[in-house]
Amino acid sequence: MTIGEDSPAVAEPKDPAAAEANILQTLARGLAVLEAVAEYNGSATPKLLARQLGLKQGTCYHLLRTLRAEGYVVRLPGGQFDVGPRGNALGKGLSARTAPAPDIAAILSRLHNKTGETVYVCGWFHGTILRQQVITGRQSLTIKNLDVGYVGNMHARASCQAVLAYLPTSQVETMFDGTPFTKLTHNTIGTFDDLVAELDTIRRRGYAIDFEAFENDICCVAAPFFDGSGTPVGSFTVSVPVSRYPQLRVMLSIAVREAGVLATNLLKTGRLALPATPMDSDSSFD
């Protein structure tokens, strides 16, 4: 994310609107720095942050000092920065508001136990699809933006596509109106028409696959779940390295769809019940 370079120091604008614009720009820069610090998990340096965000190092230092003074970031012994106690409090507050219901969390734990891989559940929050809970796998896996609360790049994420596929096309079009289809990798969907075509494939298949569309070397498989009226309300996702996907693809597709069926039955009947018949592999779509 690039938020723009600094202008030379100037006197305080006399125009109130210009002064407010300066304040808002400073706030936006500070928030961008805080988000980037969280993303780097304790390895962020001022130089790295300045380069990523398109800031002068002096401005970046100033923003970090302000965030540090307020407790939103801390400076580590090696000179790197990490999220501080007040930043953690913000994250905990969001997690408390957006955490999945206990029974949904239990289904996520079951999915993790069955696959041994990194799994997460997403749901609606203020009109967007938000990652609610993550359980890391037993094998090493590095994914950027795996934090609880992440809502970006819905066009590139299997977890979002699995939900979007069961919405009216007009609603999806409204959600993406004016939103750029950022190419995160060579496989990222680049246009709305391509997204609509992919959503049609997902409906026929019953689950979504992100094959290096969100991040290189990572494959994700996701299945939706529905409320009592048949409206898609969330999804379960499993993420694995591309190198492990070929031998795991059938098991993963079955596991996420089973989780989706469990959650759908729960929301329809109020109780957890295993599917009456085993899931098939739908190998013709893999």
Image (cartoon, rainbow, N blue to C red):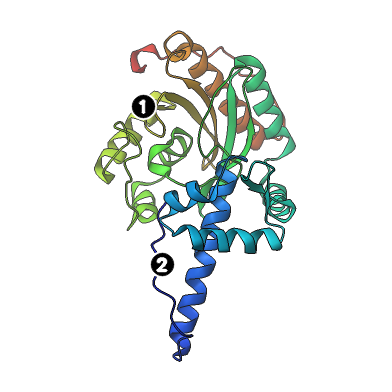
State the residue at coordinates (59%, 35%): 121
Tell which of 44 and 129 is nearer to you.
44
Is 31 drawn above or below residue 124 in the view shown?
below
Label 1 near label 2: C-beta < 8 Å?
Answer: no
The answer for how far apart the CA atoms under marks 2 and 1 are is: 50 Å
Is 126 drawn above or below residue 117 in the view shown?
below
Instruction: Give coordinates of residue 84: x percent, y percent.
Output: 70, 51
Would you name the residue on which mark 2 appears? 6
Q: Nearer the viewer, mark 2 or mark 1?
A: 2
Q: Hey, what amino acid is under mark 1?
A: Arg
State the residue at coordinates (47%, 76%): 22
CA neighbours of label 1 inside 10 A, class few (<14), some (14 to 19), many (20+): few
Q: Is residue 114 left or right of residue 244?
A: right
Instruction: Give coordinates of residue 149: x percent, y percent.
Output: 59, 46
Quarter where residue 178 is shown: bottom left
Instruction: Give coordinates of residue 109: x percent, y percent.
Output: 69, 25
> What number is the disc on residue 27?
none
> What number is the disc on residue 204?
1
Q: Secondary structure at mark 2?
A: loop
